[in-house]
Amino acid sequence: MALVGGAEWTPGCDFDGELWESSGRAEVLILPTAAAYEHPARAVDRAVAHFARFGATARGVGVLARGDAEDEMLAAEIRRARFLYLSGGSALHLRSVLKDSHVWSALRAAWEDGAVVAGSAAGAMVLGDPMVDPRGGALTLGLGLFHRLALVPRANAWSPETSHRTIGLAKGELRLAAVDEGTALIADPDGAWRVAGVGHVTVYADGHPTGLDALPAPMASA
């Protein structure tokens, strides 16, 4: 699993080549769902060109609206995938499209079966439960691929006011990961977390910075 802080498919994201290798050099399926109202075809084109740098083949899967997410043929295609990548865009639209859908069930099953799942910005935020609500920074329901970890993307662009308010969300067992653009928080198959890319990741617990070893294991059943 790779949780990217934004600016996906840019030259600094060389970790994507490593993710592709770990997938067995599988075809990369791009879900531009979060970018449905932001030229999703352009997002897919950027991804295709980016992965071509590593010799990888990528293509988009047209899951843009709720009806698409309930399409059994699209769900079956996603279930067979070995590398799935959710683009940035609107986290709330992405959540409303995928929640409790055939496509979401297929993505979850593919991940549990060993597929690589990556998401950037909105595409990473929604994977956890809870997630940070982009409308005001409070916690809200996510899709629950993992638990006890909330992601804040584009941390390098935080204002002091935003950072102070958001850091305070990390209480009790909840951890908050602030991830810079062009940077990935990656969970390896053994459950260990690491950082790759051009920026930084800061993990917070009870409002204070802590280490990656404080992050929960990325288990769907956690």
Image (cartoon, grey):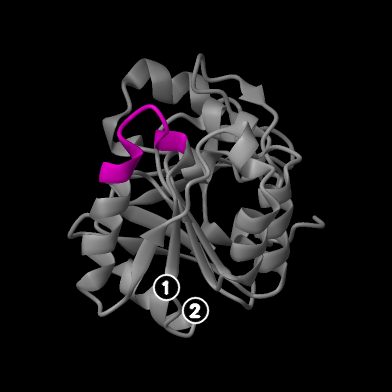
Q: 77 or 33, which is in the foreground?
A: 77
> Marks 1/2: CA distance?
6 Å
Under mark 2, the amino acid is: Ser
How many numbered circles are shown?
2
The answer to if 203 sits in the magenta stretch is no
Assess whether mark 2 and mark 1 are in contact (beta carbons under 8 angstroms).
yes
Identify the mark at residue 23; answer none if there is no mark.
2
Quadrant of the image for the N terminus? bottom right
Say what amino acid the circle numbered 1 marks: Leu
Residue at far bottom of view: 24
Residue 56: image x %, image y %?
Answer: 31, 76
Label for residue 81? Answer: none
Q: Secondary structure at mark 1?
A: helix
Q: Sort mark 1 into few (<14), some (14-19) or many (20+) by Cα contacts within 10 Å.
A: many
Q: Which residue is mark 1?
A: 19
Q: Which residues are magenta?
A: 34-42
Q: Residues within 10 Å of mark 2 (few under 14, many from 20)?
A: some
